[in-house]
Image: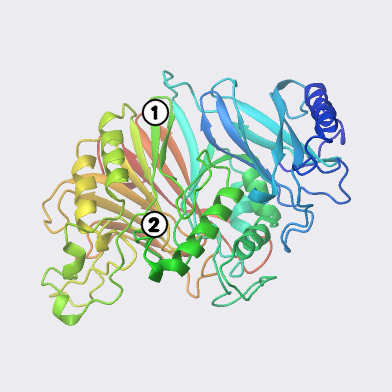
Amino acid sequence: MLRRSAVPHQLDRRAFLAASARIAALAALAPLAACAQTSAPLKLEKDPFTLGVASGDPLPGAVILWTRLAMDPLHGGGMPSAPIDVAWTIARDEAMKDVAASGSMSAIPELGHSVHVDANGLEPDRAYWYRFRAGGFDSPIGRTRTAPAASASPEVLKFAFASCQNYTQGYYTAHAALAQEDLHAVVFLGDYIYEGDARGDRVRDYAKRGWAFTLADYRDRYAQYKTDLNLQASHAAFPWIATWDDHEVENNYAGGIDVADPKNKQAVFERTNAYQAYYEHLPIRVARPSGPALKLYRALSFGDLATFHVLDTRQYRSPEVALCADSAETPSGYCAPNLDPKRTMLGKEQRDWLISGLGASHADWNFVAQSVRFAEQDSSPDPATHHFDGVDNWMGYVADRQTLIEQFARTKNAVVLSGDSHVNFVYDIKANFTDPASPRVATELLGTSISSDGDPFIPATQFDGSAKNPQLHFFDNHRGYVRCTVERGRLTADFRAVSTVTEPTATVSTVATFVVDDGKPGAHRA
Ligand SMILES: [Fe+2]
């Protein structure tokens, strides 16, 4: 999928004329605008496309194309501190002969010389190939795909979802396998990077270990992750639909803070830098962040077959209750503060947007793509007592969870996609988790990590829950991703596992296949 252009250094004519016109215009303006930034010389001494290419957030006639110029990726990018023209071309064929659109864009130092091109005017539901050119170098060619028209009724949608790619804890053998799948899109559910120092057993190390949570720190971390050729191949093969979790900023952070309060100064500093770096490195269709704020939640549809309601479970959530005081534990097994109806996971604005989006959806399948475990899971080993550990997951935000559950009951085929746990789980989502007779209203598929936590000490795959957790149907602790096939009558989820992440190459296999039938919430084994 990832290969160099067969005809290097050849600008398409429109891009060449645009670049020539721009140089002429700059030359004419130069005496009048001596202090203004002008384009750097077009010839770079080294290949700036060390971080690959990516595409994302496909619409029926458009897709975001991404790259970031970095001649010295692990040390701030190594680019001149000036805007650099980047020409782009998107074509209907892999040889890039049948050009559908082209143009040029300025990669500016303020955005780490990253570009987000909104390539539009494209045909719905078809494959395209794209390439960038800058400083005399061609980027690798990426493949992407537009979404079907809003009025279309596609019979099938194939996607995979993945999360949690700690670079130091494993090779990206799962991305190597993912890049070979036959998919329309990849949904990424967070922990694209891990901030700070390496933890646990290290398979490979970070180039930069000491951290001050500066923009330079985050940029160098993204850059090291993105130098991985398997990750580049995964991006170059499919458009991604990405959201974040905590490690894009800091472990278990909760966003709902008063940014004007001086005691939050460090948190605001970290978040501002982290959100900026996230924007710079992901192919997302969102507005450039403003300070510690980036509106990431959004919906993407594939005709009337499927809609992805993509959530941000970090930026607006109430603080976590990390330690439940003994006096606060309730007989229900929940920590009392977690039952406070004022607590929120999504914030009012995002929750209202989701509820109305689910309510108005005409899609046969409604995927809620988000980072952390949604279903209830009782972790008490004692049959007579309950313990619902709400640290960092929806058990800590019971009121918001119940509001969503009530909407799921009125929504066609609601399926929650989650990550974060570094293992696979399949859950029923019940109208009332505390009532064994309560009906199922939705399904949760929680996918394992790409590499985080490394190879399992003791590989384990278990089917069917226990008396304590009858809503749980599957547990598995391999590394990998989940491949989904959406059809009118069913959703099929293949839990794909790689044989290892401690070696650079691995085999991949399906450890389990679960099916959700149309109109019948809850998954069963195929
Ligand atoms: Fe993670």
Task: Give left or right: position of 342 versus 444.
Answer: left
Q: How is the image coloured?
A: rainbow
Q: Quadrant of residue 358?
A: top left
Q: Which mark is residue 475?
A: none
Q: Earlier in the sequence, mark 2 or mark 1?
A: 1
Q: Quadrant of residue 87?
A: top right
- Residue nearest the observer in this picture, 331 or 20: 20
Q: Position of residue 52 (x, y in %)?
A: 71, 47
Task: Judge the density around disc 1: few (<14), some (14-19), many (≥20) Cα neighbours within 10 Å.
Answer: many
- Residue nearest the observer in this picture, 28 or 82: 28
Pointer 2 residue: 314
Judge depth for marks 2 and 1 and give the one in front: 2
Which image quadrant: the C terminus? Answer: top left
Q: Residue 392: in sight, yes or no?
A: yes
Q: Which mark is residue 305?
A: 1
Q: Position of residue 69 (x, y in %)?
A: 73, 48
Q: Quadrant of residue 407?
A: top left
Q: Position of residue 152 (x, y in %)?
A: 44, 19
Name the residue type under label 2: Arg
